[in-house]
């Protein structure tokens, strides 16, 4: 196979090299069945069982890599995507990558924070203050929409120490667990943007075979996200208790009812519950006559 054909048959997916999104991104891909030949120390992980390779890069570079078609797909935070959109708009350009799916990880928020001991008297009190951030465009939009005149101090990192160094009065940075703020004696005062991970794709039309893999990946991601909380429950119960039992099963659709050989009054019930099944639920089921209850995790689901 020559190099151009090879380039066209394998998908390239950009993932954050080292950060909050790295582990959950790799975990999602593993759950989708991808086996990577190399770890994250290398720049490139080659998919052994799918025509998909993973490129490890700085998260802020992911939107550019995808819209310039260096990578076909990217897993990146909404915060990075929205900042990039505004940056492009400021230059009169438009973002050309497309968001394919919001993902259930990387939850965090871009927030304003100030020294813990400083009292906060609402947005009006921000007038004239200096706010340090690596997200100048999102911050600017936030301030403009609320008609707050504050000074934006653009930094490229280590934002959380800016107030201590006297470079700014406040910061605007990502907060996930809150431990970075706490360690720096900062207190959150306003939310600028709620964020989570997103799967983005190139604006370029892909060859049919690659497009097919993108769609398969999307279906698998959907399956993975669906089963996260799902449980498979099996139990025996008196046929007469079925209406009560159906009400007790959390988030289940139509359960399968199976007759039990030799006991005409009792049946086996199998159901997928879309929510976790707690001990309390099992105790309630027992009270209406259920027995031999088994709760199993659901590993995969495909509609
Ligand atoms: C963010 C942010 C903080 C940290 C907050 O960095 O800059 O340092 O996460 O998380 P915490 O509330 O759990 O302490 P990120 O992982 O996005 O890396 P980057 O900004 O260097 O890309
Ligand atoms: Zn970053």
Image: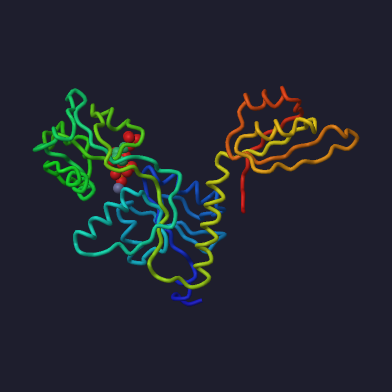
Left-right relation of 274 to 68: right
Picture quadrant of residue 299: top right
- Quarter of image, ligand 1: top left
Left or right position of 202 against 152: right
Tell me the residue at 31%/37% (across/down). Answer: 175
x then y, percent, for residue 129: 11, 37
255 or 45, which lies in front?
255
Residue plotted at (62% across, 49% down): 301
Q: Quadrant of residue 133?
A: top left
134 displayed left or right of 244: left
Q: Residue at x 19, y 62 (%)?
A: 91
Q: Position of residue 259 (x, y in %)?
A: 83, 39
Percent x, y of residue 262: 91, 35
Location of residue 49 with respect to 249 vertically, above or below: below
Residue 110, above or below 184: below
| Residue 87 location (% of width, % of height) | 22, 56
Residue 152, picture quadrant: top left
Return the residue found at the far right: 262
Q: Report if residue 44 is visible in the image.
A: no
* Left-right relation of 208 to 290: left
Work out whether residue 154 or residue 15 is closer to the camera in this orientation and state it.
154
Is residue 25 visible in this depiction of the protein? yes
* Residue visible at 27% across and 28% down in the picture: 183
């Amino acid at each position: 196979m020559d190099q151009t054909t090879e380039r066209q048959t394998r998908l390239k997916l950009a993932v954050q090299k080292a950060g909050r999104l790295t582990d959950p991104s790799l975990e999602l891909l593993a759950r989708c069945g991808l086996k990577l030949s190399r770890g994250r120390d290398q720049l490139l992980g080659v998919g052994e069982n799918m025509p998909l390779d993973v490129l490890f890069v700085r998260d802020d570079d992911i939107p550019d890599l995808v819209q310039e078609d260096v990578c076909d797909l990217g897993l990146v935070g909404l915060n990075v995507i929205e900042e990039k959109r505004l940056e492009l708009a400021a230059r009169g350009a438009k973002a050309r990558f497309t968001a394919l799916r919001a993902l259930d990880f990387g939850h965090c928020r871009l927030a304003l924070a100030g020294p813990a001991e400083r009292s906060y008297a609402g947005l009006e009190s921000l007038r004239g203050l200096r706010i340090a951030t690596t997200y100048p465009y999102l911050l600017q939009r936030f301030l403009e929409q609320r008609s707050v005149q504050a000074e934006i101090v653009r930094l490229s990192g280590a934002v959380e120490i800016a107030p201590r160094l006297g470079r700014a009065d406040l910061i605007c940075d990502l907060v996930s667990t809150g431990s970075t703020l706490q360690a720096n004696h900062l207190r959150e005062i306003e939310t600028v943007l709620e964020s989570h991970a997103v799967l983005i794709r190139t604006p370029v039309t892909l060859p049919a075979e690659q497009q097919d893999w993108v769609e398969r990946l999307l279906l698998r991601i959907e399956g993975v996200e669906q089963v996260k909380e799902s449980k498979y429950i099996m139990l025996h119960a008196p046929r007469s208790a079925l209406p009560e039992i159906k009400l007790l099963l959390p988030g289940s659709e139509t359960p399968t009812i199976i007759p039990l050989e030799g006991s005409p009054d009792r049946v086996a019930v199998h159901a997928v519950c879309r929510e976790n099944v707690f001990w309390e639920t099992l105790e309630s089921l027992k009270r209406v006559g259920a027995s031999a209850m088994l709760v199993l995790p659901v590993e995969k689901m495909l509609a």
